[in-house]
Image (tube, rainbow, N blue to C red):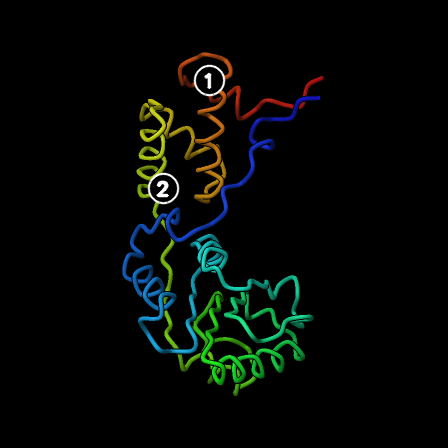
Amino acid sequence: MRQLILDLLPESPPTLDNFVAGGNDETLAALTGWLAGALENTAFCLHGETGCGKSHLLLGSGFTYVDAAANPGLDGITAGAPLAVDNVEALDASGQVALFALFNQLKADGERLLTAAGQPPSHLALREDLRTRLGSGLIYRLQPLSDAEKAAAIAAQARERALKLTPEIIDYLMRHAPRNMRALTALIVALDRYTLEHKRAVTLPLLRELLHQETTA
């Protein structure tokens, strides 16, 4: 059995370098400086709508990563190393108590806490003492990329691979492919490999073939 090429490709691990900033240059610069120790704040909170890149930056931070949506009680999480908590608004009552204690321990140890949520800390339905702790640090909003910024980003990635994408092909990608940048980037990688595998130039029929190919024997 041979699966769709997109499914066979390993995902590129999120890093700060492969994050497409768009209009978030200031936020990315602040986060990079904070991670490098240029800023002394214990906490740094990123907030913004789904798909704006919060998880990418938390995963790319190098901190111990935990998703509160999957582990709302922060079970098994201990202090001792920098911590990144995603979807912090999903913490249950015990998870909120745990994060409050973790924050205090990280601060005492000179370590840091990076969090992400849909809203800034002051708007989250969390216990007041935890909101206060999270709100005491740096707070930045991530802006989602516009369609034009996404199109420009995938065009640049294609050029780096010597792929020639016409405006028609880019428009088709933007209308028919997943709209988040990780998926679009993976698709450019898949398209590059698919053209090499089949020794064909990038055309609209070839792109449709790649997007709609099903598992075959």
Mark number, residue 165: none
Task: Residue at 46% x, 44% y: name it.
Answer: 180
Residue closer to the observer: 195 or 88: 195
- Specify the amino acid type for callout 2: Lys
SS type, badge 2:
helix
Whether residue 149 is situated above or below residue 57 in the rendered picture: above
The image quarter in which residue 185 lies: top left
SS type, badge 1:
helix
* Mark found first going from the N terminus, 2 or 1: 2
In percent of width and height, residue 168 lies at: 35, 24
The image quarter in which residue 24 lies: bottom left
**Mark 1 burial class by Cα count in 10 Å: few <14, some 14-19, many 20+:** few
The image quarter in which residue 70 lies: bottom right
In percent of width and height, residue 96 lies at: 60, 79
Task: Residue at 68% x, 19% y: name it.
Answer: 216
- Specify the amino acid type for callout 1: Leu
Mark number, residue 150: 2
Task: Residue at 53% x, 41% y: name it.
Answer: 11
Quarter of the figure with the C terminus? top right
Mark 2 vs mark 1: in front: 1
Which residue was labeled with disc 1?
196
Whether residue 214 is situated above or below residue 17 in the rendered picture: above
* C-alpha separation, residue under disc 2 versus residue under disc 1: 24 Å
